[in-house]
Image (spheres, grey):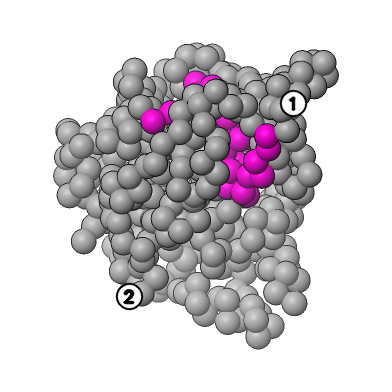
Amino acid sequence: MTYASKLDHLAPSVSAKSFASEAAPNLSTSSGPIAPHGGQLSNLMVSDPKEKAALIASCNGVTMEVSDRGACDVELLVVGGFSPLKGFMDEASYTHVVENNRTPDGLLFGLPVVMDTRDESLKPGVKVLLTYKGQNLAVMEITSQFVPNKAKEAKMCYGTSSLEHPGVQMIAMERGKFYIGGNIHGLEIPERVFPCKTPAELRAELPSDKDVVAFQCRNPVHRAHYELFTRALHAANVRPGSICLVHPTCGPTQDDDIPGIVRFKTYEVLKEEVANPLIHWAYLPYSMHMAGPREAIQHMIIRKNYGCTHFIIGRDMAGSKSCLDGEDFYGAYDAQNLAAEMAPELGMQTVPSLNVVYTEEEGYVTADIAKAKGLTEMKLSGTKFRKMLRAGDDIPEWFAFKSVVNVLREAAK
């Protein structure tokens, strides 16, 4: 069963219209940078050393080591990626977002932003120092502790409560019994091999007088992906001369995904290989939930905070398959339909993800053109690609960039 039948509580007016007709009716007329979500970019970092020391002392030795996922959420909170949030959601905010896709004051939010713990002593009134691999990331002022209804959270946010879904496994099996909410004060940014620019830094680099089309990915970029996001710059609702921000997530994803550090290396070599002035590259410290339509909204909100005006929505974006039978949890266009419905409220526009195929006669074209002209399509499955990588076989250049293949081969040794 797909997620489409479960979208009514999120966007009652989602219709069965095609994504293309929803996505491209109006040209952008933006002037100046897009406003952050909620109107103001959060900056929760503390710069004064004395204030930092006082905050740490106020915790009275209470500390909590956060997970890789937790470190990503802390970073996005303190730098403003989750603007306008000032901390982790309390019970009221969490419940409202789970049930309504909105905060209690009506602001759209795709997924709840929570901190979990197994420590029952972390109660309201306690200040806790959040640590990560030897770093003091932030001080959290706890105002709420509660036992979440994880089955409800899974059903509402992921469209299923089945443990066959990796996101449901994460909230049910990785997260602790309690969620704690409250404001946080940033002390340090997690040290990473891949540098992640803040929303303020990226906004300063991006042109304020052009459309910025965001491309989200969690895998290495191959030829078809490159065709997809470069062609997006010529979409009907994107102004001429605009740029594409390739903004991959480099935090935790699914267990069988390529590690973040390897993905980062593939992006870096590809950036040098293509040297395309219309493509801007940056990295996002975000951990994927594989929550399909609701996660697509979360991605749009985050990219809006980073200064993007448009967002490319792929087929089955942030989708997932059952770990038992391989069945898709979401329909191919569920995320596209919900994103197109919510885009006007966010002040953004969606760009359709073209279905491009490689043909012997004309190279990359859209699938409809290939069919109309009777062109010969060349195909290579992901499974076969991985087998060829492991075997040391030559990878067709129409499928993958040599620089990317070299990084993947090196990582596989």
Question: Quick check: is 369 in the magenta stretch?
Answer: no
Looking at the image, residue 344 sits to the left or right of residue 45; the answer is: left
Residue at 74% from the left image edge and 26% from the top image edge:
56
Residue 319 in the image: above or below residue 136 = below
Q: Residue 119, position in %: x, y?
A: 55, 44
The kind of secondary structure element at disc 1 is helix
Q: Amino acid at mark 2?
A: Asp
Q: Quadrant of residue 236?
A: top left
Q: Residue furthest front?
A: 121
Q: Residue 404, position in %: x, y?
A: 68, 63
Q: Which residue is mark 1?
A: 56
Question: Quick check: is 84 in the magenta stretch?
Answer: yes
Q: Nearer the viewer, residue 135 or 334?
A: 135
Give the magenta range: 62-91
Q: Residue furthest bottom?
A: 391
Q: Which residue is mark 2?
A: 325
Lower sequence index among marks 1 and 2: 1
Residue 405 in the image: above or below residue 42 = below
Residue 409 in the image: above or below residue 297 = below
